[in-house]
Image (cartoon, grey):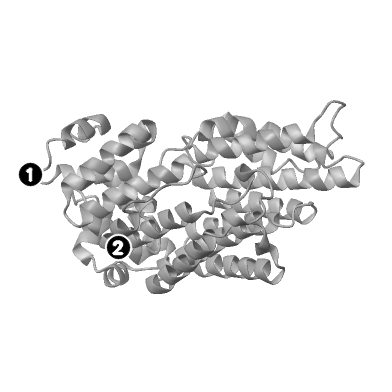
Amino acid sequence: MANEDLGRTLRRLRRLASLTQEALAERSGVSIDVIRHLEQGRKHSARLPTLHALANGLGVELTALLGDPPAVATTGESDGPRFVAVRRAVMPALWKQEPEPKAAGFSLDGLRDRIAEGWTHYHSAEFDTVMKALPDLISDARSATASGDEDDRRDAFAALGKVLQLAGHVAVRMGKTDLALISLERAIDAADQSSDPLLVSMIVNSAAWTYQRQGRLEDALSIALRAADDLVNASRTDTADGLKVWGALTMSTATSAARSGHYERAAAMMQTAEKEAARVAKLPDGGDNRMVSVFSPSSVRIERVRLAVQYGHPQDALALAKGMRLSKDTPPSWRTWLLLDVARAHTDIGDAAGAVKTLESLRRVAPTWMQHHTLAVAIVRDLWTLPNHPSALRPLAEFLGVSE
């Protein structure tokens, strides 16, 4: 990221948090001179520990400062035709006619498969592919809700809720959190009319994630905790799918707690979640894993590693990551984050060789993501400034354009 962009982002996030430069300095432990020089674009760069501290002081993810990993290019409110099409699909024009029932030959099962495929592309960071598909998926799901058969209509509302949830996730990746919340609120309306007893809770978890991105940590924690408790009270955690949704909500609650400065509470919640995740494989499986929350011993451990790194416990992160065996349903994006967080932890303890080895693994696993991932670039740039960095760092720096 250009220094000027970093300064603007820091200033914007500080103002969103209603913090003065002095207040941010006190909360983050970063000197006010460093903050002032970054915001003015006068400081040449910032090391990762400084950025970590600033992110923690602001209550945001590190990538909020660095910029999100690669998604679809966006230029503000007046976006290109593809994003306008998604916006129109989520928010149809006023007085638009009600959808007509689908023609003969339409398959609700086929629609569900297409939506599940969209989630697969999303978890693989193929956001452009998802963007192309979303308008038709939303339109087809809306039309399916006009079916005359009550059972089919309820199933169609479940499909509509799930595709609007997907649109909300993509909007977050585009930096459009207000649009994301509109899409998610409409997804919840559809889920309320659906045949899926878990869908509202799944979408609430997405809304909590969006609140986190807006810095609304108390709101995020509150709705995730309530939805998790509702699942327990309704005895929904006796199936694999129900437990996965509860687990995802619990991890979200822990993340909000950690960003609010309650790391020990968050760590305890994550430990509880990891124990519960071991039950998933022993319970009846409910359906298509592509359409249910990501929750397994692997995913919980990945989140525990992330929180440990983010909140200044790199040794804990490395201990948690050591010897990890990822389950087959772990999405590629989660594998990528794990390797990035392990590389960050090695960097934080001064183990440049360990960080480089981890980044070499990342390059083999996800070269496209790595080449454009802001955190990968930041780690390599940090290592490149070391006077005696490992020789193996050069190919990585050249790959990312850091050595120029």
According to the picture, the residue beneath numbered tag 2 turns out to be 316
Residue 23, horizontal then vertical, whole percent? 31, 71
Q: Which residue is mark 1?
A: 388
Q: Nearer the viewer, residue 402 or 45?
A: 402
Residue 383 in view (yes/no)? yes
* Three-letter code for the amino acid on which mark 1 is drawn: Asn
Under mark 2, the amino acid is Asp
Query: The C terminus appears in which quarter of the rendering?
Result: top left
Residue 306 x %, y %: 37, 56
Q: Is residue 205 above or below residue 176?
A: below
- Front residue (pair 273, 59): 273
Instruction: State the image coordinates of residue 7 (x, y, percent, origin top left).
Output: 30, 51
Q: Is disc 1 surrounded by few (<14), some (14 to 19) or many (20+) residues within 10 Å?
A: few
Image location of residue 139, percent across then percent down: 74, 35
Distance between the alpha carbons at the discs numbered 2 and 1 = 26 Å
Asked whether residue 78 is in view, the answer is no
- Which is more toward the observer, 98 or 209? 209
**Disc 2 element:** helix
